[in-house]
Every structure is written in C-alpha cells, then in structure tokens.
Image (cartoon, coloured by chain):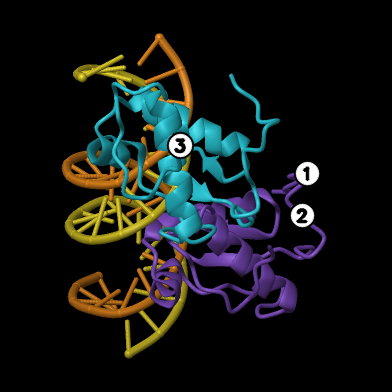
Chain colours: A purple, B cyan, C orange, D yellow
Amino acid sequence: MEFGPDDQIDYDGPVTPYRQLAEILRARIARGDWAPNRAIPSEARLVQEYGPARTTVRRAIKVLVEDGVLFVVPQRGTFVAKRSADNRPGEAGQES
Amino acid sequence: MEFGPDDQIDYDGPVTPYRQLAEILRARIARGDWAPNRAIPSEARLVQEYGPARTTVRRAIKVLVEDGVLFVVPQRGTFVAKRSADNRPGEAGQES
DNA sequence: CAACATTTGTACGTATGTATC
DNA sequence: AGATACATACGTACAAATGTT
C-alpha cells in the first residue's frame, strides 16, 4: 500500500497518523512539490492542511529528518535536503 | 452448533469461553460489523461487552490472528485482515 | 528601537490502546 | 483483576530566534 501526495490521513487505520503523514510528505517531495533547499510548509500550515495535532506533524517531520530527506533550521523552517530523493527508509544516513 | 454474532458466552458449557468468543467475533466479522483494515473494539471494550476477563479476550483474539482473520498493531489496536472472510479454521487449525 | 508576526522548541495534561507483570 | 509501562495523539501554552513593519 503506497501513499500518494494527495492522500488524507486515516485516523482509524492500522498505520499511525504520523507515519501516514511522513509518507505523504515523502511522496510530495519525490514528486517535486518543493525543490531542494526550499522550505516545506510550516508546522502550523501542515496542521491546517492535514488536520492532525502539531505533535503529529513534528513526529512525521522527525521521520524524514532521520531519513535525510528534510533538515530543520530552528526559527527558520524545515527544508528539503539536496539528495532527498536518494534517501530511503532503509539506512538512515543524515549529514549535518 | 454454530455461533452467531449476538451470542453470549456460556460459562457452563463444554466449549471454553475464549473459543466461544473467538467464534462470536468471527461471525461478526463475516457479517461485516467491521470492515477490513478497520479496528475491532478494544480489549477493554470487549471485556465490557461480553463479560470475560481480559485474558480471555486476548486468547480469543490470538485464535483469530493465527487464522489470519485479525492482525494486531502494537499500541494501536486490533484490525480486520483484508481477506478475513477467506480464512477459516479448517481441521488443521493449530491450538496453543 | 519597538511592536508584531512567523516558525521551531519545549513542556504539560488528557485520552486511548496494547504490553507486561 | 489490577497496576504499571509504553506509544501515540490531541490540545494548549509559552519560550526563543528571526524577519518585517
């Protein structure tokens, strides 16, 4: 079961909402919704778009940060890593 | 003697309570009370509904998990498998 | 400089579920 | 049966840094 960029979060399913959101964002990044070194929507914006609590958004972002897909700049935003497409859930290789 | 969705547990009969509950739940799933990928009531809820100890509920769930009818997601819930209707106990079912 | 908005960081409390003892 | 632990999610509030007006 793959996640698409336009999917909504299913709160009653077996997959946790933060995992779903992570895969949704991953799909949108892979599709090129936001270019490398560009900021994705703010946490507050993602809360508005997808409905979850901010805690859930942050958890989803954390997954992608650990996968090297995103990186966070405090008080600035969350950005798409340069080689975000290469990074997959398997090996978590993040550079700092 | 078949079990129906509305049956109660008979604690004085020859069939163990957990077996009865398993068949009750199986009937409810077959009847479509919960769709595939949807969660069945929580263990605590089933305790309330049918009266047994939680141990009994868990044992019943275990039977259906081994039959491929249900699957458990830790910290999330117990869900109906997609092809739950196909899976039947058969005579080769394993006991534990 | 001051005031404000934006964004991430952190913390607390509540609720639900399973896991374990 | 009951207690405790852990994971997840929601809501709220405030702090800190940055950017804008």
The span from disc 3 to disc 1 (Cα, nearest Å) is 41 Å
Secondary structure category for the residue under label 2: loop
Extreme residue toward the right, this view: A86
The N terminus of chain A is located in which quarter?
Answer: bottom right
Extreme residue toward the front, this view: B1
Note whether residue B39 is visible.
Answer: no
Q: Residues within 10 Å of mark 3 (few under 14, many from 20)?
A: many
The reply to whether the C-beta atoms of the residues labelled 2 and 1 are less than 8 Å apart is yes
Amino acid at dot 1? Glu
Secondary structure category for the residue under label 1: loop
Q: Position of residue A81 (x, y in %)?
A: 71, 63
Describe residue B64's horizontal placement relative to residue C18 as left or right. right
Give the residue drawn at x 55%, y 52%: A62
Judging from the image, mark 1 belongs to the subunit labelled A
Residue D21 position (above or below residue B12):
below
Give the residue drawn at x 50%, y 66%: A76
The residue that mark 3 highlights is: B22
Give the residue drawn at x 70%, y 30%: B92
Q: Position of residue A96 (x, y in %)?
A: 69, 48
Specify the quadrant of the image occupied by residue A12: bottom left
Query: Any mark on residue A91, and which?
Result: 1
Secondary structure category for the residue under label 3: helix
